[in-house]
Amino acid sequence: MSLLNIFTIIYTSSLVAPLMVLLLGFVIKYIYTRCRRDPRMVELANTLPGPRGFPLIGNGLDFHLREDALQLVLEYKEKYGDVYRLWIGNTLAIFFSNITDVENVFMNSKILGKPQLFKPFRDFFGDGLFTTYSIPKWRRNRRHFQSLFIPGAVGIYVAEINEKVYHAVDKMKELVDGPEFDVWESMGHLSFDVMNKTLMNAEVNERDVATMQYHTSITIAQTICFKMLCLPWLQHEILKWFFYKNKIQRLRRNIVSFVRKLIEKKECEIKQQIEAHKNKTVEDIPPKRLITLAYELTEQGKDDSIMIDELITMLAGGTGSPGILGSFFLLAVAIHQDIQNRLYDELYEVFGDGDRMADEDDIARFPYLDKVLKETLRRFPILPLMFREVEDDTKIGNRLIPAGTMVVVSVGAIHFNPEYYPDPWKFNPENFNAEAVEKRPKLAFLAFSAGPRNCIGIHFAMLQMKLTLIALLRNYSIYTKMKMDDIYMNNGFPTVSVNGFKLTLKQRIRKPTYLLCNE
Ligand code: HEM
């Protein structure tokens, strides 16, 4: 009997009505169990202020519909204070911006995992350091990579970073005295080149189809992830399968295939490096690169997903944020010409009008550059929210937070708190004077997060940024028509400027700016 016949018999028989009722019952029960909120979360939520959310959907739409996420975070803080709650679907999310609570969150060993709602990030980028909620796995891999990123270790990359930076600076010559351009693309490509050269020991051709597909896939994947985080019902397996299955598979395939090709090219070298370290066959063996360390995570004959996922994580983390930070920095100093002049004069003190490249010892000679960079990170928080999930019931302050609750540190609200930064909307590098830093709590600056799960790449990122900005400012004077009021942080992960980073360049006249002003 065919399927069609069975349907015909059911349809024409008296079984239709009871079957329909049964089916409806199943659907209602399914929706009810999926959408039911944990009663302990509801009880806690009732004690906290927060906006009303839609039933089932919660408040994620607020973020999805707003163009400027940072502004929304600040509005919520203004309205509801330092601790408030939102519902993201049926997950309770508690937002903190009081330093004592924030310290309790970051230092709590029961709050180390990333939320279940980060699942879309795992679909695209895999289960690497940034996304994984398996704490044993995170601990093991973080320890494995840590030695590469300590302050004393990153200095060995100065020459390689400089090589890439000077290549980019040279390419920018064609923009001198030309029309306005958006600097984000150049800065993004530069940090991608630097990551590949230093940590992967690889040269990547930007015009290669696989490279272009990789970049496009990362950008689209980040947009989809943020959307699915705000609208968590899209994460439901059925809806995801229906709307996103092909896209997820295609983008993930592009991302993985780029990284896999990189490893294939380097495999021979990686094996030699591992052997050399095992047998100490060569004197002064250079330290292992990231790609070698990642390779070591794959045991012989086992699947290579751990290596692939960690490399994707590092590449994405090490490329996106530095590219955006460099762009915000250049935009800010183009708007504040007085700050740019002071930066150049500091560089002139060390290099004069010569062409010598900066070396490792030079880096500590630019305290003003350090302040301007930190002020850029404060004023433009690229990751304005940090997410964690409570593993076991735990206390934050006097509140018992049930397992499964999402806790969110509101970095944006802290960086714009006038108690720590007077006149917080003003771009003011003096916020990072020794006395100002001394006066406020350490956790009032959270650009790289804090605690054991902070950014592993801080020292690498700061070194790379300083070498890049030193070379750019020594060669070019930077201008823009944009004003501070034109800059809105978009709604994304990471966030960028909605109106772009539009600059014009002039060749730098290598004289201290205080002399030029008098001429
Ligand atoms: C301007 C540059 C950068 C900024 C602003 C930045 C920011 C951050 C922040 C805020 C986190 C922690 C998020 C959280 O607490 O949930 C993080 C994590 C991470 N970052 Fe960075 N980052 C930068 C550069 C880099 C670089 C250059 C690398 C790699 C070379 C990198 C690799 C990572 C990784 C692997 C994690 C996950 C760490 C873990 O969970 O153990 N980042 N980053």
Image (cartoon, rainbow, N blue to C red):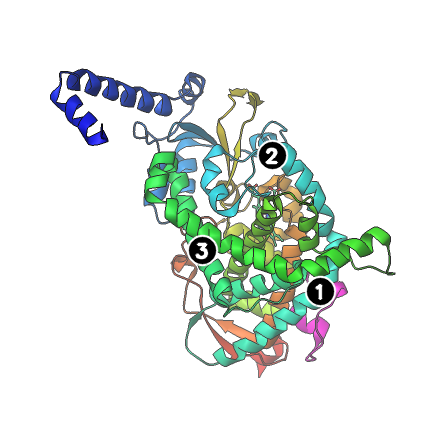
> Does residue 489 appear in this view?
no
- Pinpoint residue 343: horizontal percent, then vertical percent: 61, 67
Q: Are marks 2 and 3 in contact (CB under 8 Å)?
A: no
Q: What residue sits right under mark 1 in the picture?
A: 158
**Residue for point 43% across, 48% down:** 249
Q: Earlier in the sequence, mark 2 or mark 1?
A: 2
Give the residue type that dot 2 points to.
Phe
Marks 2 and 1 close (CB-CB < 8 Å): no
From the top left corner, tell me how far across and down residue 111 is, in percent.
Answer: 58, 30
- Part of the protein shown in magenta: 345-369
Q: Is residue 275 left or right of residue 190?
A: right
Q: Residue at label 3?
A: 217
Depth-wise, is mark 2 or mark 1 nearer the camera? 1
Q: Main secondary structure of the magenta part?
A: helix
x 62%, y 29%: residue: 108
User: Does label 2 point to a residue whose CB lies under 8 Å from ligand 1?
Assistant: yes
- Residue sitting at x 62%, y 61%: 196
- Local secondary structure at mark 3: helix
User: Is 349 part of what is drawn in magenta?
Assistant: yes
Left or right, 389 with respect to 270, comes to: left
* Towards the viewer: 234 or 58: 234
Q: Is residue 146 above or below residue 512?
A: above
Image quadrant in which the C terminus is located: bottom right
SS of the residue under disc 1: helix
Mark 1 Cβ inside 8 Å of ligand 1: no
Q: Nearer the viewer, mark 3 or mark 1?
A: 3
Q: Where does the image place residue 272, in percent across and percent down from the top left? A: 76, 58
Q: Amino acid at mark 3?
A: Ser
Residue tagged 2: 106
Report how far apart the C-alphas of labels 3 and 1 lie in the structure: 30 Å
In this rendering, does residue 347 appear at all?
A: yes
